[in-house]
Image: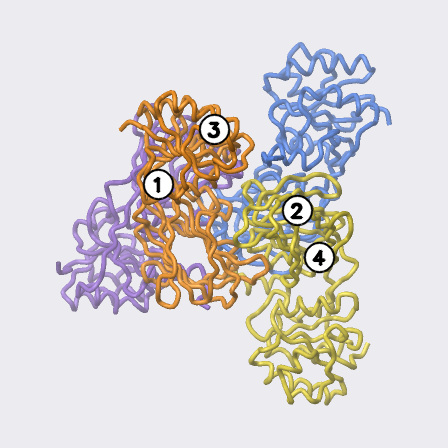
Chain colours: A yellow, B blue, C orange, D purple
Amino acid sequence: MAIRSIGIISKPKRDRLEEVVPPLIDWLAKRNIKALIDHETADTLGSASHAAAVIDRSQLAPKCDLLLVLGGDGTLLAAARHVQNCNIPIFAVNLGSLGFLTAITISELYPSLELVLEGKHQVECRKMLQIDVMRAGAVAATYHALNDAVLNKAAIARILDFQLFIDGQFVNFLKADGLIVSTPTGSTAYSLAAGGPIVYPTVDAFVLTPICPHTLTNRPLVVPDRSRIEIVLKSESESVFLTVDGQVGLGFHSEDRVICSLSPYRTSLVHPPHKEFFGVLRSKLKWGER
Amino acid sequence: MAIRSIGIISKPKRDRLEEVVPPLIDWLAKRNIKALIDHETADTLGSASHAAAVIDRSQLAPKCDLLLVLGGDGTLLAAARHVQNCNIPIFAVNLGSLGFLTAITISELYPSLELVLEGKHQVECRKMLQIDVMRAGAVAATYHALNDAVLNKAAIARILDFQLFIDGQFVNFLKADGLIVSTPTGSTAYSLAAGGPIVYPTVDAFVLTPICPHTLTNRPLVVPDRSRIEIVLKSESESVFLTVDGQVGLGFHSEDRVICSLSPYRTSLVHPPHKEFFGVLRSKLKWGER
Amino acid sequence: MAIRSIGIISKPKRDRLEEVVPPLIDWLAKRNIKALIDHETADTLGSASHAAAVIDRSQLAPKCDLLLVLGGDGTLLAAARHVQNCNIPIFAVNLGSLGFLTAITISELYPSLELVLEGKHQVECRKMLQIDVMRAGAVAATYHALNDAVLNKAAIARILDFQLFIDGQFVNFLKADGLIVSTPTGSTAYSLAAGGPIVYPTVDAFVLTPICPHTLTNRPLVVPDRSRIEIVLKSESESVFLTVDGQVGLGFHSEDRVICSLSPYRTSLVHPPHKEFFGVLRSKLKWGER
Amino acid sequence: MAIRSIGIISKPKRDRLEEVVPPLIDWLAKRNIKALIDHETADTLGSASHAAAVIDRSQLAPKCDLLLVLGGDGTLLAAARHVQNCNIPIFAVNLGSLGFLTAITISELYPSLELVLEGKHQVECRKMLQIDVMRAGAVAATYHALNDAVLNKAAIARILDFQLFIDGQFVNFLKADGLIVSTPTGSTAYSLAAGGPIVYPTVDAFVLTPICPHTLTNRPLVVPDRSRIEIVLKSESESVFLTVDGQVGLGFHSEDRVICSLSPYRTSLVHPPHKEFFGVLRSKLKWGER
């Protein structure tokens, strides 16, 4: 399918944005491709963005054939939230250092984009995590995550008590600073810093990684992604927060429940040409190649 | 299907064997079930075993409807090697402390066995790992593991150098004491001691856990069990060994390759009634239940 | 020196307090020992405490020969703050489960106290950590910790950036959820949960344990306790907090500095008879004794 | 004290040795400094070494004012064994990649050596570990280590059982692949790969790091270096080995005891100018400097 319109979402206030976006809009225009930008990008660019249509970020996805994200992994996660129920692929270009999800550098932008326009690219379909927050027996909120859902304590709060169930089976009482439920995609993000394993993107599993568990035998747990993961907060403290993909915050109360399961949504990522998963790992984790 | 004959494999020299096996043979005889024992058990029991047929361990499986293993996880792994190409279920009873795979205690033997004879039990089908050792371009040996394959160095050897590939993609050069390739079943065995995650038995994945990696960013890696894992030994040292399920040893040379993939075999385990996976974890890992 | 007055500090609202404290006051009175209690304990006991003098917790220490703490490790840490510049020994009895610092159980209270009154006990002198918070070139606050000082981020904040110096030498830029500076005494508390080593109480060292470090090669660091540890917050976020012994909170700003060094204060702990350090470790960490 | 003779110990078979050593001998001769080389170096150099006196490595130290080591950390450890009861400083130059102990690169050889000859250098005195092996009540062997003593199992052996005592106090029964007793100097070597902390060289402590412990709550333990560490092997297996600084091997039997304590020997290292401990850590562990 030919690409006729490209939405651009960028990390606002990035210094390099002014150098990068206006020439990109011109480059696309020469190829008869319409550029649509969000208000944040438009504000950053000022008058330089006049050639592009400005649309609210939440309305952008249905009007585009491809979403071009300029920024780091955080920008990509924010963008993914806005296209999660569409099916358009995301092409991510890192304006700074290499990211796990944003492995194309700015110098590779045009050659890579050329390949995409010619259809010479692959799209990876990444599974997502659905998070339902239950309060007093009702669904209080629902989220979809590409990376992870994190329940953790405020800086000054005491250790948290969780009760964990998988498919209705009691797993354990967990005393910890927090708990991460991660997709394979998110396994190289916060879960890795907390001691979790690296999970290849196509493994059909979620990872539950405790944060600073009080019981030293609590280890990361890998479960099938068809599991229903239920986390019940038993602490009385009110200083507990849920964050989804590092971006959404929700205060949490005792006896609130988080149900994690496979989301019906998927995120489609344009696979960066010549950037295999393990190659990105080697660069990011500084694995010597001998 | 009615059970008419039960093979018994036990850990030889176990003190309690003489107390346990002869009454068990009688108990089975009263129910018209034939007991078959291996030579090792017969030798341990002496004349006390006269009521049972004695058969070579390797011939036992085709003649039985159920295999009863008396011993710890090691005994079960040894028994599993002898039934790997049959399809008979293994019912494991631990004569000592609780094992991850042998969660039925001796006091639960008869009530549990009663349930099994009445067909009131579930059988779990555990996936296995196939290990092909390639030397000078040819397959030098093939093994099947329920738990894991381990490549590690001799006590006095220097650190090893491995080259790792997944589905033909280069992963990294690994400098470590060794490398464990584990099934989900084996994730609670050696891999856990080396820092690997706990993987629920039905996750379709293998875990690659480095042993004391020199590069601190080398972490356990979870890959789909449909992957072809290729490990090439680059060290010149000849003090490298392959062990499969902790029981088989093979010397290893530079440029030898180990190919790990999903085995066509499965191990059928009688699921111990009232012993869920997480309950066994809680007991074994001493997770407080509050 | 004969003990003539004992101060009692307890965890308020503990159910068992009413059962324990009044008989204890009587028991002491019979031995001509004066009991002094803090307002919190008096409030919990109500009229049952009439036999004891009630004194403000901050005034308690100079009037006592011994401080008896009833509660867990948290209660002991709180009490220690009130006696840090005195020199009176603390005798800690755990009303609940065993603590690392409160290894005497309620059933051992009277036999142990008898030994103490007879002078048949040892007092351990534990070193403390001094924490000076520098803001805009001036000391904004000073604390003394028996266990640890923790700098960490709020639940919803982004990862923190620290700059670390030891004795003026630059160590590294640390990207992490937080950083723990621990005494040997605190090494079995939060630092252990974050992956730190167990440090024997008499080692002359502090431990710096990063919390979920982004760079996987950042490991716990043990430095001499004569070191001057300087931590500079480089994050712009204002959601950073300092906690001292889990109990004091202070908001933190970019370019604030924390200087950690050996405190001139010591905490004197009555060594529980028959409770060696490693015995407590074996109980708390459930190390099998075979 | 003026330096009049320099002993040279090198890693035999190093390609670069022929380029480096003969010009170095000439350079020293011009400054009236006598070069002494060991037989291994002489054999590698052949006729190119004629200007230097050739002496047995074990006799080298008493005849020199400085020992120059050309090679990696392994070469330095081997050299240190031969000078452990002398008091001459070691100046180590790395012919390959940077080592923790050999932080001077070949391009820095002459400028650094110039500083040393002018006396403009510091010598660091590193504490060592004494290892006494007790068999049947008698001392069977005594070693001195700059880095570590390691007890570990052969590749195909089962898990080991150790009994550990500190200053006569029972610590625990350890089930593990092995156990490392490390000096602070050795904390960045094998102990780090096994999960141990980084210990600043002047901390008066030893680190006990279990290798792949079966009990997940067994953590690295830091004890004062005035401790008497006693390890008793309880396994019946004969496939257990002691290695000291990675270089000496001794077979081990059940009930053999290893006593570790502070050695009366020290190793004197010429501190590489402009190479602080943390700078070397940053390079070796690839800590980003931002």
In this rendering, position of residue A167 left or right of residue B45:
right
Q: CA separation, marks 4 and 2? A: 35 Å
Check the image and report above or below for C52 versus A245. above
Looking at the figure, which quarter contains the N terminus of chain A? bottom right
**Mark 2 residue element:** loop
Give the residue pinned by disc 4: A202
**Mark 3 residue element:** helix
The spot of residue A102 in percent (x, y) is: 63, 69
Q: Are marks 3 and 2 on the same chain?
A: no
The spot of residue C148 in percent (x, y) is: 42, 48
Name which residue type carries label 1: Thr
Give the residue pinned by disc 1: C267
- Residue at point 45%, 41% (across, down): C188
Write down the quadrant of residue C257 in the picture: bottom left
Q: Chain of mark 1?
A: C
Name the front one of labels 3 and 4: 3
Q: CA separation, marks 3 and 4? A: 61 Å
Can you tell which mark lies on residue A173? none
Q: Chain of mark 3?
A: C
